[in-house]
Image (spheres, rainbow, N blue to C red):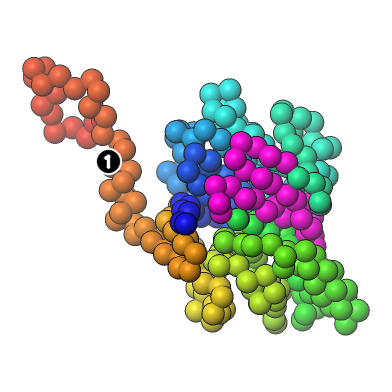
Amino acid sequence: MSAGAMVTFFHHAGFMAAVEDTLMIFDYWRGENGEINPENQLTERDLEGYKHIIVFVSNDDPDHFDPAILELDDKKFPIQYVFAADMKRYPALQKDGLFLAEGDAAEIGPAQIRAYASTHKGVSYYVTVHGLNIFHAGTLNMWHWRDESTLREIVRAEEDFYAAVVPLTRLPMDIAMFPVDPRMGGMYEAGANHFVMAVKPRLFIPMHFQNRPEVATSYARQGRTNYTEILAMTRPRQRAELTFDDMTLRIHVFTLKEMQQEMANRDVKLDSYNKDDPFNDTDLPVTL
């Protein structure tokens, strides 16, 4: 039996994952300094054609919660918001949102959702949809800051993280998006390494790498194991088509040329074209 997903990276910890009729958007953020230019930002065009659209926010840090997501037209599109429970204090979020604390579960269409622990704020999310198991870590990580923290702080960070990961080791996991944050200095990848070895996701996608794509690409080269493939997605709107079989994983990362060609094809609309109208014969760059 095979299952597939189309995963799009936006920026920082922001992803979009499409599985059959369901679109999931995780921790979308346009960036502090315009890292995503307008043509690569999330638009309502991305939502067209899906029966279920789920927008996840793992915590209220500005780099995980962009108010732009609240501007999506949930009357035009079948959008359901899922927030961390401690975000209930925001009045603007009372619009048909689900608020999940650690251990809470919900079902939206074909998606079964459960919230797990974070070691900073909010929650992490585990979603099973159409046979695929997808995990977004939010800010779950071993935040030890080894070059600055005291020994006691380091030990506490390790203990908290190990305890948070234990429940995840019992879960089948096809796709995991997890922080690899170089701000922590020495051993910044320790949390990711433990997660990969303990949980064994089939595909690990680094995130939260602080505008340093070389961190993600380096981890992809060094961190893979016999059980886990690692895919570095570092450009806004970079997309990967993933196909999971019982024993194999196939990955097609779209090149920039392929993505430009696809967008060009989507722009051509011939519904109103009339071959008998001489004004349709033009060299101007218009959409017919």
Q: Nearer the viewer, residue 278 or 96?
A: 96
Identify the residue at image location x=72%, y=33%: 97
**Residue numbers of the magenta segment:** 106-132
Q: Is residue 237 left or right of residue 286?
A: right
Where is residue 9 drawn, in percent x and y? 51, 55
| Residue drawn at point x = 42 percent, y = 63 percent | 251
| Any part of residue 48 in sight | yes
Residue at image location 77% in from the left, 40% down from the top: 99
Percent coordinates x, y for residue 5 in the rendering: 48, 52
Question: At which x and y percent is residue 242?
Answer: 45, 58
Q: Is residue 252 found left or right of 124 in the rendered image?
A: left
State whether residue 108 is above or below residue 184: above
Q: Is residue 278 above or below residue 14?
A: above
Q: What residue appears at the point 57 percent right and 44 percent down from the top-left corner?
A: 24
Magenta segment: does it hold 112?
yes
In this rendering, does residue 68 appear at all?
A: no
Three-letter amino acid code of the residue under disc 1: Asn
Between 286 and 103, the residue placed more toward the observer is 103
Q: Quadrant of residue 141?
A: bottom right
Q: Position of residue 135 (x, y in %)?
A: 64, 57
Q: Is residue 250 left or right of residue 260?
A: right
Question: Which residue in the structure is indicated by mark 1?
Answer: 265
* Label 1: element kind: helix
Residue sticking out furthest to the top? 277
The total number of labels drawn is: 1
> Which residue reaches farthest front?
1
- Above or below for 27 versus 135: above
